[in-house]
Amino acid sequence: MHRRVVMIGIAGDSAAGKTTLSKGIVQALGEDQVTAICCDHYHKYNRQMRKELGISALSPEGNYIDIMEQHFRLLREGKPILMPIYNHKTGDFDPPVYIKPKKYMIIEGLLPFYTHRMRLNFDVKVYLDPPEELRYAWKVQRDTAKRGYTREEVMASLEKRQDLSPRYIHPQKRVADMIVRFYPPENNMQEIGGHLNAQVVLKPTVPHPDLTDVLHHGSNGVNPALRLNLGRYEGTPADFMEIAGNLVEDKAHDLIELIQRHMPADCQLNEAMLGQYQLGLEAQRSLPLALTQHLIAYHMVTAGQTIDEMQS
């Protein structure tokens, strides 16, 4: 494989926040540098056919896994693809779209890490793992606001998929390099937006930055903005970074600036675009999300630097 493009994978269940996470990174690094796609377009059947056949969109047998493997490899090599387009509103397929990768490539979706061949293409693999109650709330917000479903229809769909996610989606956590979990603070369990805490599990499968200076700056005070604890994730040693949901703007800006110093000097990143998300149809900002996106952007930029050095 001729590695010419930096590829980051973001996996997770439906409405786990994959598109929100990737969109902010694209906007911060610039659309002229980053191509982002969703691999959930590779369904074999439209909505009506899946209903007749009794096959779920979460199931590998309902998706063209072999075509995903081919397209991931082509994109990694800097070659264009003709990507299928599944329309979530109509439940049918639109005309395919010509996709040409730029310097950085983000692939997000339900099953990007399902096979070994797919995983080989990624520099860093991220898995989003919110609590189920939070994910349900997000899915209801999204599907009623953007996809025309009623709340009852969304909840019925979630119930039908309960057995499939543990079988096909959740096992991808084991092969991820970073696991991101947004969750509500104990004193406000109803929170679903900008004041969610974030936990980022950093596995030693990729070299993470030495954030000693960032942690020192973020840990000052009675309620630290950042904490890092050494532990084990499913038997594997890992660092657990905790980002407080009550993080304030000035502190977040300082922490982002410190992380920026670990990146190549010529990296231009638009900090204002980090942390942006939509709750229903309303635009909001999450500072823990911003820091998480910046950490992923760090991996993208440093991987790009390595490829540049290999090609020079």
Image (spheres, rainbow, N blue to C red):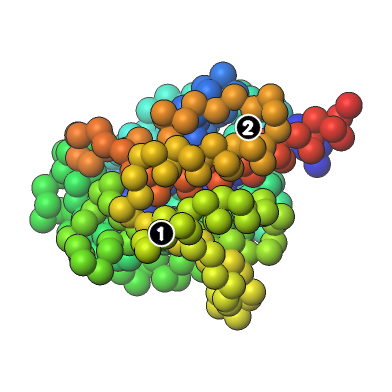
Locate residue 245: give its quadrant.
bottom left
**Near-viewer residue (69 or 276):** 276
Locate residue 283: give its quadrant.
top left
| Front: mark 2 or 1 | 1
Of the numbered discs in the image, which one, if any, rests on residue 235?
Answer: none
Residue 18 in percent (x, y) is at: 42, 46
**On screen, 243 above or below 7?**
below
3D distance between C-alphas at marks 2 and 1: 37 Å
Give, as a three-letter code, the residue at label 2: Tyr
**On screen, 292 above or below 306?**
below
Number of residues whose C-alpha sits closer than 10 Å to that of mark 2, classed few (under 14), some (14–19) or many (20 or more)? many
Residue 9 in percent (x, y) is at: 57, 47
Query: On the rendered structure, is 156 left or right of 309?
Result: left
Give, as a three-letter code, the residue at label 1: Gly
Q: Residue at position x 23%, y 54% from top?
A: 192
Q: How many marks?
A: 2
**Near-viewer residue (259 or 125):** 259
Of the numbered discs in the image, which one, if any, rests on residue 221?
Answer: 1
Specify whether residue 154 is in view: yes
Image quarter hosting the C terminus: top right
Image quarter hosting the N terminus: top right
Of the numbered discs in the image, which one, if any, rests on residue 104?
Answer: 2
